[in-house]
Amino acid sequence: MEKKLTMPKLRPEMEKGVLCAWLKEEGDVVTTGEALFEIETDKVVNQIEATESGILKKQLCEEGDTVDVESPVAILETE
Amino acid sequence: MLNVQNSSHDPFYNQAFEEFVFQTFQEDDIFFLWQNSPAVVVGSYQNICREVHVETLWKLGIPVVRRISGGGTVYHDLGNVNYTYIIQQDGPVDYDRCLQPVIGALNAIGVPARKGRTCDIAIGEQKISGSAQRIAGGRILHHGTLLFQSDLRMLEHITTHHKNDCFQSRGTISAICPVTNIRDHLTTPMTITEFQTRLLNQMVPAGNHRLTLTAEQEAAVCLLRDEKYRSWEWTWGKTPAFTYEKSGVFAGAPIHLTYRANRGIVSDAVIDCASVDGSEATRLLNGTRLDPEGFAAICRRLSGSRAEELMDWLL
């Protein structure tokens, strides 16, 4: 099943975040708890970890892209 | 609350120490103080060349270190005290949860500190502390500077002058704020050592664990320092992709200079100037690493006696 991963809302006032680094490439196997990507907002770098296992099917944005909160950033293929 | 002592002043070691502690002592809340000998510390996602004048730092012998948290560029020296505060993540990002205990401790030892903008601590309208965070694995690493008796002229010279606007890139841009030293606002004077002891006693009262790393743990920190924090890949290779463009007059001739860098590797370099061999410049620059020493060597080959001047055009 395909599942969209989105830009998380880390603070009530957060509207956008920068996806600053991909820690997994397309095609990589991902297990729950593993770090997927890093985002930066204000002064915080937040490492985002997988909440379920699967294969990272598609990265929907590039490193450095500013993404609206709750917009998709990747597609995870889950069992 | 756990305290892990760190008496090193080596800025590369200290970044590695902090990352090691963050990853190793996962069960406890942690607070510790540390100091760097003069160094520039940049945010995880910043373009060093945009933020500081690399050649100036090079001449002053001041190293640049990239940290793992967000935010902007700071200058450290032995008049500045850094704190690191590590706690469990509990709900949304909340700076106050980390800042308030530190402000409370400062107030208790006679520092009239209050919360400044976003993530700052101020006295009156002037900043005494900037901070940043990294969140990973359900824990928050919050760290900040505390200007006690820093060389503010040097700080200003390094962090606010020479901002280079020739870079079009998407990295984090530093904010520039008026700053002051804590020492100038004390009703009862204290030394920087007394300041550190009192602050630590407030944050980690007697009865809490205070420990130092074992020899084995210290070896692990040194390995991390050498393999990560002193590496080109971390410091320069992490530079967000950018396009650089600058024009003017060099050695009596008009110059127009452009290049791009992605993951720290230069491409599409063009120097259009009657005083520089353009095809040799393109050949030398394309594929080279974004690295002040490497750039200086290329400038020497291209322009001999005017190498330093050409370097100013390139970075």
Image: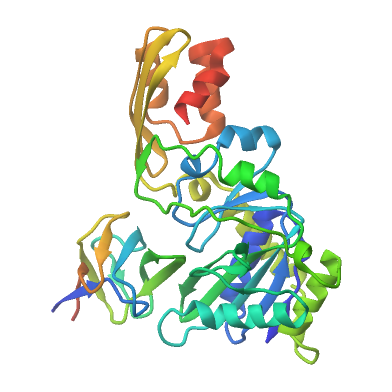
Up/down of B175 relative to B130, above or below = above
Task: Single out the residue that lies furthest toward the left.
Answer: A1
**Residue B231 x %, y %:** 56, 47
To which quarter of the image does residue A59 belong? bottom left
Task: Single out the residue that lies furthest toward the bottom.
Answer: B207
Quadrant containing the N terminus of chain B in the rendered view: bottom right
**Residue B153 x %, y %:** 69, 45
Viewer can see residue B136? yes
At horizontal 34% and vertical 80% (from top left) the residue drawn is: A12
**Residue B72 x %, y %:** 50, 56
Tell me: B101 left or right of A1.
Answer: right
Of B40 and A55, nearer the camera is B40
**Residue B73 x %, y %:** 54, 53
Up/down of B295 relative to A39, above or below = above
Up/down of B211 relative to B19, above or below = below
Viewer can see residue B211? no
At horizontal 59% and vertical 81% (from top left) the residue drawn is: B100
Tell me: B249 left or right of B258.
Answer: right
Up/down of B201 relative to B41, above or below = below
To which quarter of the image does residue B24 belong? bottom right
Q: How many marks?
A: 0
Q: How is the image coloured?
A: rainbow
Tell me: B114 left or right of B106.
Answer: left
To which quarter of the image does residue B249 belong? top left
Tell me: B174 left or right of B246.
Answer: right
Of A52 and B74, nearer the camera is B74
At horizontal 38% and vertical 7% (from top left) the residue drawn is: B274
Of B314 and B289, nearer the camera is B314
